[in-house]
Image: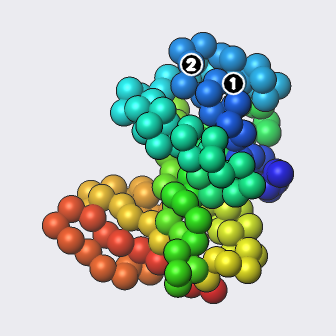
């Protein structure tokens, strides 16, 4: 599976590719045929992948796209510029939640806004998905702009976070 725009390719990583993702070498980039760019994975992300993502991918092979990272590739450089994730299958109301992150040197160029748009188009075309949710820290203006530019509206807020949604 591959989502594509003029500048980007977005692909969901397989179980084997997620195992490569957490290695401290360019094995994932080489496996994907990409130019390595010194990507470093924070320890807290490695822990989430090892304790949550990999076990889910091992059990739910058919629906892996709802549990894996979707990597974002910049066509012009053939490099990874960020990742997104759907945080599980749609709930009883047909809602899914997404998360995303742009690698620091690629921030501020509109890549994540574009990639989130691609993921939304795909997700909302799935019959079981009726609503997409996301949350941002109140001080994360860049992330809020990504959601606003993709049509999300604020559903609720608490002390630290804004909770957003987009419905079909």
Tell which circle, 2 or 1, labels the residue nearer the N-terminal end.
2
Q: Which is more toward the observer, 72 or 18?
A: 18
Residue ID at (82%, 51%):
2
Is disc 1 surrounded by few (<14), some (14 to 19) or many (20+) residues within 10 Å? many
Secondary element at image label 1 = helix
Residue 74 image position (x, y, % from top left)? 72, 39
Residue 106 image position (x, y, % from top left)? 56, 38
In the picture as drawn, the residue positioned furthest to the top comes out as: 25
Secondary element at image label 2 = loop
Picture quadrant where residue 115 is located = bottom right
Which residue is identified by label 1?
A: 28
Spatial CA span between label 2 and label 1: 8 Å
Q: Which is more toward the observer, 48 or 115?
A: 48
Residue ID at (75%, 55%):
62
Picture quadrant where residue 47 is located = top left
Residue ID at (79%, 55%):
3
On screen, residue 148 versus residue 63, left or right, reads: left
Looking at the image, can residue 52 be seen? Answer: yes
Which residue is identified by label 2?
A: 23
Assess whether mark 1 and mark 2 are in contact (beta carbons under 8 angstroms): yes
- Split into 4 quadrants, where in the image is the C terminus? bottom right
Instruction: Check residue 135 in the rendering and tell me which mark sits there, or answer none.
Output: none
On screen, residue 131 versus residue 70, left or right, reads: left
On screen, residue 53 versus residue 11, left or right, reads: left
Picture quadrant where residue 13 is located = top right
In the picture as drawn, the residue positioned furthest to the front comes out as: 59
Q: Where is 43 relative to 89, above or below? A: above
Looking at the image, can residue 166 be seen? Answer: no
Residue ID at (83%, 51%):
1
């Amino acid at each position: 599976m591959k989502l594509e725009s003029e500048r980007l390719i977005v692909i969901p990583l397989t179980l084997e590719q997620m195992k490569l993702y957490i290695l401290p070498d360019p094995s994932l980039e080489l496996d994907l045929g990409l130019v390595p760019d010194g990507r470093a994975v924070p320890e807290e992300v490695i822990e989430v992948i090892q304790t949550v993502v990999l076990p889910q991918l091992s059990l739910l092979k058919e629906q892996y796209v709802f549990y894996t990272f979707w990597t974002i590739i910049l066509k012009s450089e053939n490099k990874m510029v960020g990742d997104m994730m759907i945080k599980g299958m749609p709930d009883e109301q047909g809602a899914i939640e997404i998360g995303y992150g742009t690698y620091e040197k690629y921030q501020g160029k509109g890549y994540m806004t574009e990639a989130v748009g691609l993921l939304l188009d795909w997700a909302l075309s799935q019959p079981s998905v009726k609503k997409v949710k996301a949350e941002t820290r109140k001080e994360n203006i860049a992330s809020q702009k990504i959601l606003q530019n993709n049509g999300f509206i604020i559903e609720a807020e608490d002390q630290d976070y804004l909770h957003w949604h987009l419905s079909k």
